[in-house]
Image (tube, rainbow, N blue to C red):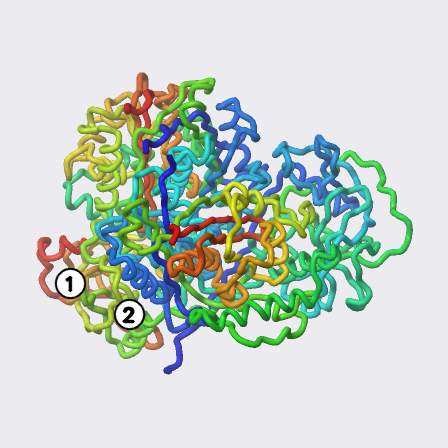
Amino acid sequence: MTRQIAVVAFAQSDHRRTTDELSEVEMLMPVLHEVLARTGLRTADIDFTCSGSSDYLAGRAFSFTMTLDGVGAWPPVSESHVEMDGAFALYEAWSRLLTGEADTALVYAYGKSSPGPLRDVLTRQLDPYYLAPLWPDSVALAALQAQALLDAGDTDEHALAAIGARSRADATANPHAQLAGPVPRGDHLVRPLRTGDCPPIGDGAAAVILAAGDRARELCARPAWIRGLDHRIEPHSLGARDLTDSPSARLAAERAGAFERPVDTAELHAPFSSQEVVLRKALRLGDEVCVNPSGGALAANPVMAAGLIRIGEAAARVHRGASDRALAHATSGPCLQQNLVAVLEGDPR
Amino acid sequence: MPDVLKAPLVVEFPFTRSLGPVQRAFFTGLREGVVLGARTTAGRVLVPPAEYDPDTAAELHDLVPVAATGTVTTWAWNHAPRTGQPLARPFAWVLVRLDGADTALLHALDAPGPDDVRTGMRVRVRWAAERTGAITDIACFEPYDGPPEQPAAHTGEFENPVTGIVAPARLDYTYTPGRAQSDHLESLARRKIVGERCPSCRKVYVPPRGACPTCGVATGEHVEVGPRGTVTTFCVVNIKARNLDIEVPYVYAHIALDGADLALHARIGGIPYDHVRMGLRVEPVWTDGARHPDHYRPTGEPDADYDTYKELL
Amino acid sequence: MSKEPVAVVGIGQSKHAAARRDVSLAGLVREAAQRALDDAELGWADIEAVVIGKAPDFFEGVMMPELYLADALGAAGKPVLRVHTAGSVGGSTALVAANLVAARLHGTVLTVAFEKQSESNAMWGLSLPIPFQQPLLAGAGGFFAPHVRAYMRRSGAPDTVGALVAHKDRRNALKNPYAHLHEHDITLEKVMAAPMLWDPVRYSETCPSSDGACAMVLTGRAGAARAPRPPAWLLGGAMRSEPTLFAGKDFVSPRAGRDCAADVYRQAGITDPRRDIDAVEMYVPFSWYEPMWLENLGFAEEGEGWKLTEAGVTALDGDLPVNMSGGVLSTNPIGASGMLRFAEAALQVRGQAGEHQVPGARKALGHAYGGGSQFFAMWLVGAEPPER
């Protein structure tokens, strides 16, 4: 029998365009304190710690070594780091708990997009021979995908605008959101994408605590049980992929058991409005599913933390009884190259 | 709010990228005006040619020429080109499936405006005037209404094949050191070395980094330390470091300033390098215009006893 | 719930060199991965997930290169994780991969680590200038040399010990066809005659900068039963981290290293590491770290590690051979260096280490560390599966 593991606490920063008065650890540490306080745990009570971040965002090698200061890793801790979104750090931590070697885990992620030119920084993720020398920025690549969707008749500009408007309207109820309320569709940034179709650029951090079995029940009144968790990647070359589909997201969802029963909520890591269209199709989410009640990445997209935040937001809804079965999704790479899906459930009420 | 301390941080390097056989052939072909694809065992022709089949992971080596003409499979209008992009004037990003290929290549399309671009339009390669064997040997695509060009047969073997590319990359960041380090730097400007005390374990950190790393809590209480301190350990540097204008040999030391609970790192001067020893008492030497002490020099005090600093070693 | 036992059934590494100008990044990684698959007699379709590790992305100037490497690693449609824990990353990466098998998430996992340092310049990548901070005053060796001096002061070790280690490891490398440095005419005199770059560390006692990759195929009980060659069984594995700099930090013998070893030994039922372990492959970027780690890992009492080195105990024909492969002193693609240590330990207990085989090795320790002596990853592998 597989061990039952749950998200028992979630915390995040207020996401902002810049946090230049704070170092990374100064930005992260209050979030760590908050997530620990929610469970009453201290660092010494945590069996495993795992984080996600990227040196390229900050422009400094080994940036994660300094943020470990915020954990208080003394006595030494069992700890690891992925150069990925924190959602993948959560996956690593979950796999540790599954073996029974750990009962609790702290997962955190942070990203400061403000110090560098984010659109250009992300070009460094691309094939260094065929793509990176052309500096195709992240918005341009998403725009190629959006045009493919328009050509395929999968969406239209009004539908895209509606996704942006709905996300920012929902974000008014999210005190951490960077962009909320009425936001104009704006001019084309890279046509067909308008500024309103694109995520805000900003800094932020998030943290989650995982616990297994009875420990989870002790720490949380209504744990968000991870019923399934899986992630898959696709080939890198955009010209070798069908950009209107996300077979990797669908496969991850299938392996996570997402299609076994309907979900009531989905938190999708879709930084661009057009990507929500792709994901809704791949994940078979109908209109009855509440998608991105937090406002999603269109309301706050701290790179490297935004995927973990989707899991945290979905879990928080289960914690407070607003959802019984939620899907959370995280992505990495150009045009949804890599996708992670988690299925979270609360105990019956 | 007071002005936040910030400074430019440039991350720049001309990366030297060696190439595998498929990439070598492809780039050499571009230099010679030939576009090569890689054929998979299933018969698909991948352009640009992958080194490994995305479907089966098989290593690819069967190279076939494809036409320099093709069809746009999707596009995006870029009205504000960014640094490093193929064209400085507004252009369309395009994925182009070249005639004879099964996958599409990403590049720029030179077109007057977005109304002149559509999916399915025909385009051809505009070659760069000077070609070196790189993806940028394709200057861009341009609209084309002729028949598909027929690629000449080609083996993929060339004289003087390209073996590598140089890929310069520069990213301009703005660095901000954060609250604690900014306070410390501000004190240095007044030639005072100020650390911060952990409210929990009471240790004094210099330079402060905003968190007590063992307690995981914010430090805040300012504590002036030094200026004198003790060399806890050191090495003699006999090799000139890049971008560092210091005559070798010199001594690089760990110095526990009086009142600090861990050592900081600095150069020792004012004493022959081979007279430096563990326990030596030193003080900072400031120079005009420099933010940090230039180096530390002996105070003339008796050496500190090993037991007084071994915990700081 | 019990864990699935984890077996290493395939090991591969690239030829390591200062610059592998004949391959792309993908080609380098692929060389190691393909050899690991060949060793396991498996195909790409047999791999269910890939865990890849490397040190800072600035080295190659590719952010999160696992995205671009997905095709070369046969990863389309599979899970890919990318680990980065500084110098220990090669070890941590293997442990993350092992955990996927132990948790029964996947039956067979490929783990890979690499660095292609010739794409940039290692010192550039390690010390990007940070505004307002004093430039690193001493280069890479200068960071470590003061700790070596502290060790010498504490232990009273004679100053020849570092040269003995460098001589031994470079000699061992001559038996390892994949090693970067093959100094056929090495002698102790030559090691001793090398310039003191960062006194007390000689040039000959420092690691090179390499291009290289390492890969392993990990699987469970069923996969091991099908393996064509003897597997190495994971008997214990652990990671420990402590802060970079803190009041009371012991750079000579960091507590995270001691705790990590203790955890591994507890899992593996090791009560006397000196007696119970047959061979050790540890991360020694500067020669003096051999005696330091011997103490940190519990093979010698504090201050006594150098005596093992001096007595020849750690030689290939000694009774506790250390760094049979030639170690980091002979090959250092930073991101892969930790995994090379883990792989060598596994090669030894499989009896597959060729000329640098320790006869009859049954239990071997692989060790990696990184950052400011703060991140540790270790595994203990054996020729027999774990009891239970």
Q: How many marks?
A: 2
Q: Is residue A78 above or below residue B300?
A: above
Q: Is residue C344 left or right of residue B123?
A: left
- Looking at the rendered structure, the kind of residue marked 1 is Arg
Left or right: residue A174 versus residue B152 is left
**Mark 1 — on which chain does it sit?**
B
Q: Is residue A127 visible?
A: yes
Label at residue A219:
none
Residue occupying the point 58% across, 57% down: A123
**Figure quadrant of the N terminus of chain B:** bottom left
Work out whether mark 1 precedes mark 2 in sequence or the reverse, and give the earlier one.
1
Above/below status of A74 relative to C238: below
Q: Residue at x 52, y 63 (%)?
A: A297
Q: Chain of mark 2?
A: B
**Which residue position is annotated with label 1?**
B281
Q: Decide: marks 1, 2 in contact (CB < 8 A)?
A: no
Residue A312: quadrant of the picture: bottom left
Q: Secondary structure at mark 1?
A: strand
Looking at numbered disc 2 in the image, what kind of residue is underneath it? Pro
Measured as percent of width and height from the top left, residue A75 is found at: 21, 50
Image location of residue C74, percent across then percent down: 57, 36
The residue where tag 2 is placed is B293
Seen in the picture, residue C42 relative to A49 is either above or below; the reply is above
Q: Please tell me which residue is depicted at 43% across the width and 19% down the height of the picture.
A: C225
Location of residue A289 in the rendering, given as x and y in whole percent from the top left corner: 55, 57
Residue B118 percent location from the top left of the image: 80, 60
**Is residue C374 visible in the rendered structure shown here?**
no
